[in-house]
């Protein structure tokens, strides 16, 4: 009888703990690590040095991280893609291990960095998976240099600054910004300049991008507009606006995740990307 009561007690404690556990969209799991690359290094790009790494073999897929982050955030996705594709990750200018110059941040400039890295790696055309700023950079390339993209998976992008929520109201995003400071200090060639970096990126977020319905309507690259049902940074109406105006685009809202879907539920995120790459016809 005592054994039964003890087991029941353990079950009740377990249920109580589960009841208190936060839903995954309110969590910020640890930043993953990238697997060992087949190739990595620094590419001389537009007067700066861009850190990159390449994994696997096959059709090229480029992964672009979000603002303030670094390529390590793709540590859950790369192993899922590398058995079938050549996966390239990079740290955007001034992010992670990459350097920057005095020019102000802008999506056109950061898109030019991606294209220059593709040239350096002798990649004429690639599929692109972008998160947040990375997705915006992907859309910038799709608008201005569509010949370089075969397809675009754009997760958590916005078409203009009005599409962004006040992330200061989000404990998860606040925790991400604090984590980004620590990671910047460990990885950056200018480890003491995070405050200036954050201010400059924030200015870009406040003023860019500025795409109209006509700009989006001109995109011919096969595109999925993807977001999370609990995204704390992107307004749903802006996600729908982009999907409505990009011709033949797909719309996907991932359930029970937020702006950090790829580490909150990597199995779901990876499955969606793999489906996109396998079943959406290349341009």
Image: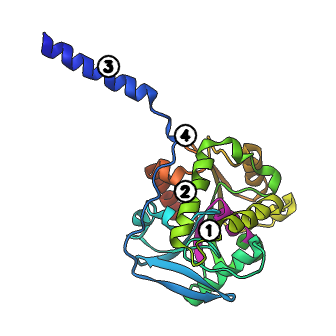
Q: Is residue 282 left or right of residue 37?
A: right
Labels 4 & 3 near each other (Cβ < 8 A)? no
Q: Nearer the viewer, residue 77 or 244?
A: 77
1 or 2: tag closer to the N-terminus: 1
3 or 2: tag closer to the N-terminus: 3
3 or 1: tag closer to the N-terminus: 3
Magenta stretch: give its range: 126-140
Residue at the spot x=42%, y=68% of the render? 34
Q: CA distance from mark 1 to mark 4?
A: 31 Å
Q: Residue 127 colored magenta?
A: yes
* Residue 5: % across, % down: 20, 13
Q: CA distance from mark 3 to mark 1?
A: 49 Å
Total labels: the figure holds 4
* Disc number lying in front (3 or 1): 3
What residue is disc 4 on? 26
What residue is disc 2 on? 179
What residue is disc 3 on? 12
- Looking at the rendered structure, the secondary structure element under dot 4 is helix
Labels 1 & 2 near each other (Cβ < 8 A)? no
């Amino acid at each position: 009888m005592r054994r039964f009561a003890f087991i029941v007690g353990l079950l009740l404690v377990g249920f109580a703990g589960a009841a208190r556990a936060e839903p995954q969209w309110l969590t910020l799991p640890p930043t993953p690590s990238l697997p060992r690359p087949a190739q990595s290094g620094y590419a001389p790009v537009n007067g700066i040095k861009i850190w990159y790494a390449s994994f696997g073999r096959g059709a090229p897929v480029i992964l672009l991280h979000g603002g303030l982050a670094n390529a390590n955030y793709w540590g859950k996705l790369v192993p899922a893609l590398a058995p079938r594709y050549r996966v390239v990750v990079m740290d955007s200018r001034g992010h992670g291990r990459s350097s920057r110059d005095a020019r102000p941040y802008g999506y056109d400039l950061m898109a030019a960095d991606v294209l220059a890295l593709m040239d350096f790696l002798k990649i004429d055309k690639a599929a692109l998976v972008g998160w947040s700023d990375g997705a915006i950079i992907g859309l910038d390339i799709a608008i201005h240099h569509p010949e370089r993209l075969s397809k675009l998976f754009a997760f958590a992008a916005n078409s203009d600054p009005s599409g962004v929520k006040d992330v200061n109201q989000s404990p998860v995003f606040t925790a991400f910004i604090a984590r980004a400071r620590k990671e910047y200090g460990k990885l950056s060639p200018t480890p003491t300049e995070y405050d200036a970096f954050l201010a400059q990126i924030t200015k870009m977020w406040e003023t860019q991008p500025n795409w109209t319905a006509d700009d989006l309507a001109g995109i011919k690259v096969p595109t999925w507009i993807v977001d999370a049902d609990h995204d704390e940074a992107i307004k749903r109406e802006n996600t729908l606006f982009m999907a409505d105006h990009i011709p033949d685009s797909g719309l996907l809202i991932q359930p029970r995740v937020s702006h950090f879907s790829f580490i909150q539920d990597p199995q779901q995120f990876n499955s969606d990307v793999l489906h996109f790459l396998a079943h959406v016809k290349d341009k």
